[in-house]
Image: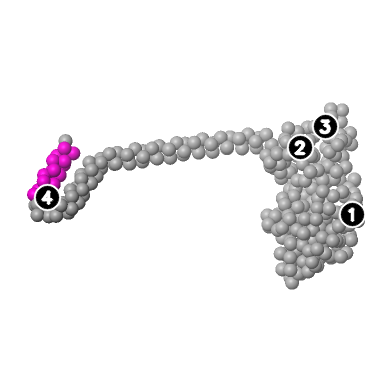
């Protein structure tokens, strides 16, 4: 009704304009007529445009509400999974205490006398950890002393050419480790101009340096600064999986994350005990709980191990 009245008014206005413009040229009259036609069409379509806008707005709000509900449901599901995982990974305090006690006692009696275990120098610990990556201990023992003889400090590494550091690394393989060590030394000591600067003791700060991952950061923090820091390498991952969680797939990201959670949950209370604990669990994986054969008959933690052979599960 309202649109019909509007059209009638427009028609009368147009007629009056035409009567008043009889003396105008034909072209001007046509332009005036065309403009009024456009105006009429826009006026008639306004309610339809508003209706479309309302529909789009309602649709947008409905989608926003749906996304909010979905996100809340997803967050709730994640929380349930996290709670279930936490319950699954929880270790009985008695088992944790017994595991640590037996492990450290065994290490004190059976630990190998390795040169990097006699130092608390962050630089020397770092060199040993980089060399031991993907390299046999017997080969590292000799080259470790030779490398430190040529580069006694981190500043000496920074002042040398990268090619010279790589040459001194010859025979150990994986030369990217030598190049990363040189980059790290340059960054920490400002190219050797600040020789008194040391590696940071916080694992997070260590990880920000070139060539240092989660394991190396934990190793330097624990073995050099006696920080209460967890570490997981191949040997540690194998021991943790066999003892506490045989169903974990250590090759997946999820499995690695769970193993790190276990490693952190079984740490002793003090940094000094953590030094022994971390050395011991690595030694156990290298000498007893090996990749090829699990020597359960001489394992110190077989009484609490979930993967131990039945005949081996007896108190030591």
Foreground: disc 1 or disc 2: 1
> For the stretch drawn in magenta, what is the main secondary structure?
helix
Q: Is 56 situated above or below 177? A: above
Q: Which of marks 4 and 1 is nearer the N terminus?
A: 4
> Do labels 1 and 3 touch, CB within 8 Å?
no
Asked if residue 8 lies in the magenta stretch, the reply is: yes
Instruction: Look at the numbered disc 3 and give the secondary structure of its residue.
Output: loop
Residue 302 drawn at (x, y percent): 83, 34
Instruction: Look at the numbered disc 2 and give the secondary structure of its residue.
Output: helix
For the magenta stretch, what is the residue range?
A: 2-19
Q: Earlier in the sequence, mark 2 or mark 3?
A: 2
Hey, which residue is sitting farthest bottom in the picture? 193
Residue 90 drawn at (x, y percent): 69, 37
The alpha-carbon separation of the residues under discs 4 and 3 comes to 103 Å
- The residue where tag 4 is placed is 17
Asked if residue 282 lies in the magenta stretch, the reply is: no
Q: Earlier in the sequence, mark 4 or mark 2?
A: 4
Residue drawn at the location 86% of the way across and 37% of the way down:
292
Foreground: disc 1 or disc 3: 1
- Relative to 193, 63 lies left or right: left
Q: Which of marks 4 and 3 is nearer the N terminus?
A: 4
Foreground: disc 4 or disc 3: 4
The alpha-carbon separation of the residues under discs 4 and 1 comes to 105 Å
The alpha-carbon separation of the residues under discs 4 and 2 comes to 93 Å
| Image quadrant in which the N terminus is located | top left
Residue drawn at the location 70% of the way across and 58% of the way down:
209
- The residue where tag 1 is placed is 141
Residue drawn at the location 73% of the way across and 55% of the way down:
211
Foreground: disc 2 or disc 3: 2
- The residue where tag 2 is placed is 241
Q: Which of 6 and 40 is in front in this view?
A: 40
- Relative to 54, 35 lies left or right: left
């Amino acid at each position: 009704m309202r649109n019909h009245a509007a059209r009638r008014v427009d028609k009368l206005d147009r007629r009056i304009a035409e009567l008043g413009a009889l003396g105008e040229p034909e072209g001007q009259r046509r332009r005036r007529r065309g403009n009024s036609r456009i105006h009429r069409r826009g006026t008639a379509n306004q309610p339809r445009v508003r209706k479309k806008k309302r529909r789009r707005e309602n649709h947008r709000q409905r989608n926003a509400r749906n996304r909010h509900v979905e996100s809340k449901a997803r967050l709730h599901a994640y929380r349930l999974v996290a709670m279930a995982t936490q319950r699954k990974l929880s270790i009985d305090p008695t088992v944790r205490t017994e595991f640590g006690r037996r492990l450290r006692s065994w290490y004190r009696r059976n630990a190998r006398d390795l040169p990097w275990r006699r130092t608390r120098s962050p630089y020397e610990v770092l060199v040993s950890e980089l060399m031991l990556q993907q390299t046999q201990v017997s080969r590292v023992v000799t080259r470790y002393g030779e490398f430190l003889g040529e580069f006694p400090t981190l500043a000496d590494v920074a002042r040398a050419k990268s090619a010279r550091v790589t040459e001194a690394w010859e025979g150990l393989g994986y030369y990217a480790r030598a190049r990363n060590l040189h980059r790290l030394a340059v960054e920490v000591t400002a190219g050797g101009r600040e020789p008194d600067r040391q590696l940071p003791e916080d694992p997070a700060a260590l990880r920000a340096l070139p060539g240092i991952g989660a394991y190396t950061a934990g190793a330097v923090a624990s073995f050099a600064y006696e920080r209460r820091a967890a570490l997981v390498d191949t040997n540690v991952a194998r021991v943790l999986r066999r003892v506490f969680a045989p169903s974990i797939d250590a090759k997946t990201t999820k499995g690695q994350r769970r193993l790190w959670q276990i490693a952190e949950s079984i740490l002793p209370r003090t940094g000094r005990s953590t030094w022994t604990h971390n050395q011991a669990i690595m030694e156990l994986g290298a000498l007893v709980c090996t990749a090829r054969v699990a020597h359960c008959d001489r394992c110190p933690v077989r009484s609490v191990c979930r993967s131990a052979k039945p005949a081996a599960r007896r108190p030591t």
